[in-house]
C-alpha cells in the first residue's frame, strides 16, 4: 500500500490516469479541465477590461481558476495556472497596448505572489487529500480482497470433504453472478451474490465423511443427515457480520419451486430469489461435472433436464434465462 509520506511527490489524479487512458478519458480528465482553467482566466481578464482595466477588484476573479487547477492537478498545475492568470491580468494588457488602468510591475508582482501562494498551498492540500483518499480506497480493497479469500478458503474447506477440486463453489459463484445480471439485479447485488453463493454448501463441514464420500447410494437415514447441511450452513454463518445473504442461500439452496425441496419445503417465490438462482446454477454445475458416484452429463442432456424440471425443481423464468446464457456459450467455466 502507498504511504502518506509520499504525498508531496505524488502527481495529482488526472496525470496518473494518462498511463492507460483512452482518448475520451484524456479529453474529459485533462483537456476539458485545462480549458476550464484557461477560460476562467480569460473571463477574469474580460471582466477587468470591460469595467475599466486595472486596478480593479475584479482581478480577484483570477482565483477560481487557480484553485480549480490546484484541485485538478495539484500544486504544479496551480503554479502554472497562477503564472498564466497573473500574466493575463498583469503585463499582457500593457504589452498589448490596451488603454485603461495604471498598474505597474509592483502590483503585478504582488498579485502574482498571492496567486502562487494560494495555488501552491491549496494544491498541496488537495494532493494530500487525494492521496489519503487513494490510501483509504486501497485499504478498503485489501480488506475486501482478504474477506473474499477467506470466504473461498472456507467454502473450499467444506468442498474438500465432498468432491476434490474446489472449483465447484467458484463456478457456482460466478454462474450465480451471471444469472443475477441476466435477471436484472444491479452490479453490486450480482457481485454480493457471487460471494454469498460460494458458501452455499459450507454446512457440509458438519456432514460425516463416511456419508459425504460414500461411493454408493445413500440410505434414507444418511440422506436425512445430508439434508441437514442446509441448516448447519445457516448456523455456521449465523454470527458472521455481513453474511445475511450467504445465510439465506445456505439454508434455502435446495428448496424446489413446487415446494418439494428441503429443509422448509418453501414454494415458488417464498424462496428468496438469490437462493432460487443458486439452486439452479448449483444443479446445472453438478450435472455437468463428475461426482464420486457418477460421471458428468453432456451439456445438451443437462439443458434438457433444466427445461424438464422448470416449474418443478427450478424457477421457470430462471431456467429460461440460464438456458439462454448456456446456449450462447456465455456461462463461465462451461465453454
Ligand atoms: Fe447443497
Ligand atoms: Fe453445490
Image (tube, rainbow, N blue to C red):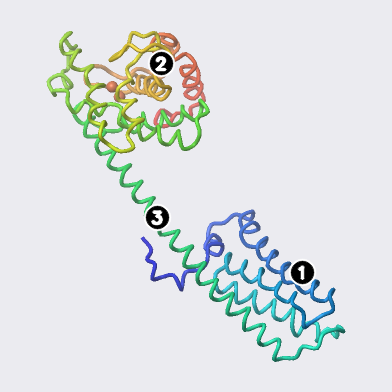
Q: Which residue is mark 1?
A: 43
Task: Give the image quarter of residue 218.
Answer: top left
Q: Comparing marks 1 and 3, which lies closer to the viewer?
A: 1
Between discs 1 and 3, the one toward the N terminus: 1
Residue 151 is marked as none
Extreme-right residue of the structure:
99
Q: Secondary structure at mark 3?
A: helix
Residue 138 is marked as 3
Between discs 3 and 2, the one toward the N terminus: 3
Residue drawn at (24%, 36%) of the image: 154
Q: Which residue is mark 2?
A: 270
The location of residue 65, given as percent across then percent down, is 66, 69
Local crowd size for mark 2, using a 10 Å CA cut-off: few (<14), some (14–19), many (≥20)? few
Q: Secondary structure at mark 2?
A: helix
- Quarter of the displayed picture in which ligand 2 can be seen: top left
Residue 75 in the figure: left or right of residue 294: right
**What is the quadrant of the C terminus in the image?**
top left
The location of residue 113, given as percent across then percent down, is 62, 84
The location of residue 114, given as percent across then percent down, is 62, 81
Task: Give the image quarter of residue 276.
Answer: top left
Residue drawn at (26%, 31%) of the image: 238
The location of residue 122, given as percent across then percent down, is 55, 71
Separation (CA) of disc 1 from disc 3:
39 Å
Task: Give the image quarter of residue 258.
Answer: top left
Residue drawn at (62%, 62%) of the image: 30
Amino acid at each position: 500500500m502507498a504511504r502518506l509520506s509520499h504525498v508531496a511527490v505524488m502527481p495529482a489524479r488526472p496525470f496518473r490516469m494518462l498511463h492507460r487512458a483512452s482518448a475520451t478519458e484524456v479529453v474529459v480528465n485533462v483537456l476539458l479541465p485545462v480549458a476550464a482553467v484557461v477560460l476562467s482566466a480569460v473571463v477574469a481578464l474580460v471582466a477587468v477590461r470591460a469595467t475599466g482595466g486595472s486596478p480593479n477588484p475584479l482581478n480577484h476573479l483570477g482565483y477560481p481558476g487557480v484553485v480549480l487547477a490546484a484541485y485538478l492537478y495539484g500544486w504544479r498545475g496551480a503554479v502554472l495556472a497562477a503564472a498564466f492568470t497573473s500574466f493575463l491580468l498583469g503585463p499582457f494588457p500593457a504589452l498589448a497596448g490596451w488603454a485603461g488602468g495604471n498598474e505597474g510591475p509592483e502590483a503585478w508582482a504582488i498579485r502574482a505572489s498571492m496567486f502562487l501562494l494560494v495555488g501552491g498551498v491549496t494544491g498541496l492540500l488537495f494532493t494530500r487529500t487525494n492521496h489519503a483518499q487513494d490510501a483509504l480506497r486501497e485499504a478498503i480493497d485489501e480488506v475486501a480482497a482478504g474477506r473474499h479469500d477467506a470466504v473461498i478458503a472456507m467454502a473450499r474447506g467444506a468442498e474438500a470433504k465432498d468432491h476434490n477440486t474446489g472449483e465447484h463453489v467458484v463456478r457456482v459463484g460466478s454462474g450465480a453472478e451471471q444469472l443475477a445480471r441476466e435477471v436484472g439485479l444491479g452490479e453490486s447485488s450480482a457481485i454480493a451474490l457471487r460471494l454469498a453463493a460460494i458458501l452455499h454448501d459450507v454446512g457440509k463441514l458438519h456432514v460425516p465423511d463416511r456419508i459425504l464420500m460414500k461411493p454408493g447410494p445413500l440410505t434414507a437415514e444418511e440422506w436425512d443427515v445430508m439434508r441437514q447441511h442446509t441448516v448447519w450452513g445457516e448456523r455456521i454463518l449465523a454470527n458472521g457480520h455481513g453474511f445475511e445473504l450467504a445465510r439465506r442461500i445456505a439454508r434455502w439452496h435446495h428448496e424446489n419451486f413446487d415446494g418439494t425441496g428441503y429443509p422448509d419445503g418453501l414454494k415458488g417465490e417464498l424462496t428468496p430469489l438469490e437462493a432460487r438462482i443458486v439452486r439452479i446454477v448449483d444443479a446445472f454445475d453438478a450435472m455437468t461435472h463428475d461426482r464420486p458416484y457418477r460421471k458428468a452429463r453432456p451439456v445438451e442432456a443437462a439443458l434438457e433436464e433444466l427445461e424438464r424440471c422448470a416449474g418443478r425443481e427450478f424457477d421457470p423464468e430462471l431456467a429460461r434465462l440460464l438456458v439462454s446464457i448456456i446456449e450462447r456459450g456465455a456461462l463461465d467455466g462451461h465453454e
